[in-house]
Amino acid sequence: MTKTKFRPVKLAASAILGASILAGCGTIGGGKKAATTKTTKLAPSMGVNSYLWRASLETLQFMPLEQVDPFGGVIITDWYANPEAPEERFKANVYILDTNLRADALKTAVFKQVRSGTGWADAPVDADTGRLIENAILTRARELYIATVDAG
């Protein structure tokens, strides 16, 4: 897996675009009824929405993965330190909570640590960071959904 730089500006742009696109969408794919159709899932054997799953993995691809559970909808990364800022590192947890492609079907938690003289110490994370990551994932999931619908 290739590590790339953590770019909050790129995530912020994706988040703004995603928020504006998803604000009026409600449930993509038609709600609960659509959750059982093939058009809202890439792989029917998954326990969660596969567009959100795939988008989450793509969005966090620069971070090493610690735990991945496609049936429970859990992605936990290991600590990642940007080579340009080796004195701080980040970890992310992503939870996919539903089979529908909806904004409330996704929850993220981001953790930060900074290096001190005695090792790594927990540090506060900007409150918008988790939301920016969620919006980047939702934007990518919507792109995947649209590509599938357009192809079919």
Image (spheres, rainbow, N blue to C red):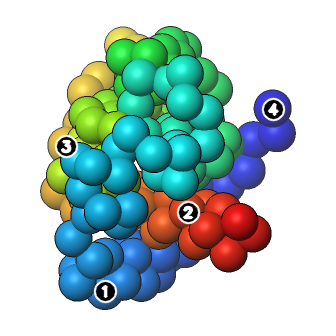
Answer left or right for 26 relative to 11: left
User: Which label number is shown at residue 124?
Assistant: 3
Residues at marks 3 and 4, CA–CA distance in whole angstroms: 28 Å
**58 versus 75 height, above or below:** below
Q: Residue at x 75, y 69 (%)?
A: 151
> Could you say which quadrant of the image residue 140 lies in?
bottom right
Q: Are marks 1 and 3 in contact (CB under 8 Å)?
A: no
Classify mark 2: helix, strand or loop: helix
Q: Which residue is mark 4?
A: 1
Answer left or right for 135 relative to 150: left
User: Which label number is shown at residue 20?
Assistant: 1
Q: Residue at x 49, y 66 (%)?
A: 142
**Amino acid under label 4?**
Met
Q: Are marks 2 and 4 in contact (CB under 8 Å)?
A: no
Looking at marks 2 and 4 on the same chain, the residue that comes earlier in the sequence is marked by: 4
Q: Are marks 1 and 4 in contact (CB under 8 Å)?
A: no
Q: Which residue is mark 2?
A: 145
**56 versus 72 height, above or below:** below
Q: Are marks 3 and 2 in contact (CB under 8 Å)?
A: no
Q: Residue at x 66, y 62 (%)?
A: 148
Of marks 1 and 3, the one in the foreground: 1
Along the viewing direction, whichever of 22 and 34 lies nearer the viewer? 34
Name the spot of residue 92 as percent of width and height, x first. Answer: 40, 34
Of marks 3 and 2, the one in the foreground: 2
Looking at marks 2 and 1 on the same chain, the residue that comes earlier in the sequence is marked by: 1
Q: Residue at x 55, y 21 (%)?
A: 45
